Image: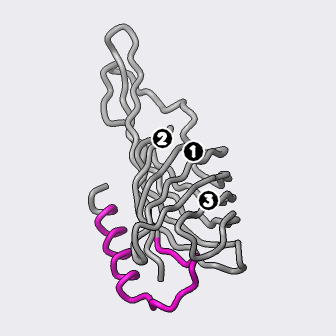
């Protein structure tokens, strides 16, 4: 997980350093962390303004989640590695260039989900029977941004969907 987080941050930093300062007010590179019902996501994404109040973009997320089953002192533990590739669209309620930005939108993503048993205290092979699966996911989100300078914008977002729900915080860099 540390290697993936470092790669995401390096890619984001490179993209910010190479981006033109003449971009539109809602063109952002986003990086951050969050909380969810399946672990702590680390993510990087990009948003492009396509209309006065509308952006579209993409995002990469990674999270790792440990889960266990314990019965009468015996149990099994699993580790889930979840990678998400998603596209999003957001409607912004404030005009471009304002200090505050509030938005709502929809994300469509594909989840690559692997589960591995790391501990078997039962002596019996236990297959995973939980609800951790990959595949297509839909998510509704609402969020807000606050510009602390022309180059750094803080943001927070909450959302939920058919695969993973949660919240995230991060930093947006206009380009």
Q: Please say if 18 is above or below 126.
A: below
Q: Residue at x 38, y 74 (%)?
A: 12
Q: Nearer the viewer, residue 97 or 36?
A: 97
Q: Nearer the viewer, residue 96 or 90?
A: 96
Circle 2 — which element?
loop
Q: Nearer the viewer, residue 108 or 15?
A: 15
The label on residue 38 is 2
Q: Which residue is mark 3?
A: 102
Region in magenta: 4-29
Q: Which residue is mark 1?
A: 164
Report the residue that reaches farthest toward the front: 99
Sequence-earlier tag: 3 or 1: 3
Q: Please say if 2 is above or below 21.
A: above
Quick check: is 157 in the magenta stretch? no
Q: Are marks 2 and 1 in contact (CB under 8 Å)?
A: yes
Q: Dot 1: few (<14), some (14–19), or many (≥20) neighbours within 10 Å?
A: some
Q: Please say if 128 is above or below 61.
A: above
Distance of label 3 from label 1 (alpha carbons):
22 Å
**What quarter of the picture does the N terminus occupy?**
bottom left
Circle 3 — which element?
strand
Q: Please say if 118 is above or below 109.
A: above
Residue 46 in picture, x, y percent from top left: 52, 73
Quick check: is 11 in the magenta stretch? yes
Q: Residue at x 49, y 32 (%)?
A: 128
Sequence-earlier tag: 2 or 3: 2
Sequence-earlier tag: 2 or 1: 2
Circle 1 — which element?
loop
Q: Residue at x 48, y 59 (%)?
A: 155
Distance of label 2 from label 1 (alpha carbons):
7 Å
């Amino acid at each position: 997980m540390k290697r993936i987080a470092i790669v995401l941050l390096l890619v984001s930093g490179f993209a910010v350093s190479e981006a033109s300062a003449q971009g539109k007010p809602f063109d952002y590179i986003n990086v951050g962390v969050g909380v969810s019902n399946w672990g702590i996501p680390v993510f990087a994404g990009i948003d492009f303004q396509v209309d006065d109040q509308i952006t579209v973009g993409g995002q990469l997320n990674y999270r790792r989640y440990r889960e266990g089953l314990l019965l009468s002192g015996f149990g099994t533990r699993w580790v889930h590695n979840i990678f998400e590739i998603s596209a999003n669209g957001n409607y912004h309620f404030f005009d471009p260039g304002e200090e505050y930005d509030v938005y709502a939108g929809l994300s469509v993503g594909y989840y690559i989900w692997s589960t591995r048993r790391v501990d078997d205290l039962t002596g019996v092979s236990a297959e995973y029977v939980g609800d951790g699966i990959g595949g297509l996911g839909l998510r509704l989100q609402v969020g807000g941004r606050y510009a602390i300078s022309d180059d750094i914008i803080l943001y927070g977002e909450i959302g939920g969907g058919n695969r993973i729900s949660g919240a995230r915080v991060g930093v947006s860099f206009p380009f």
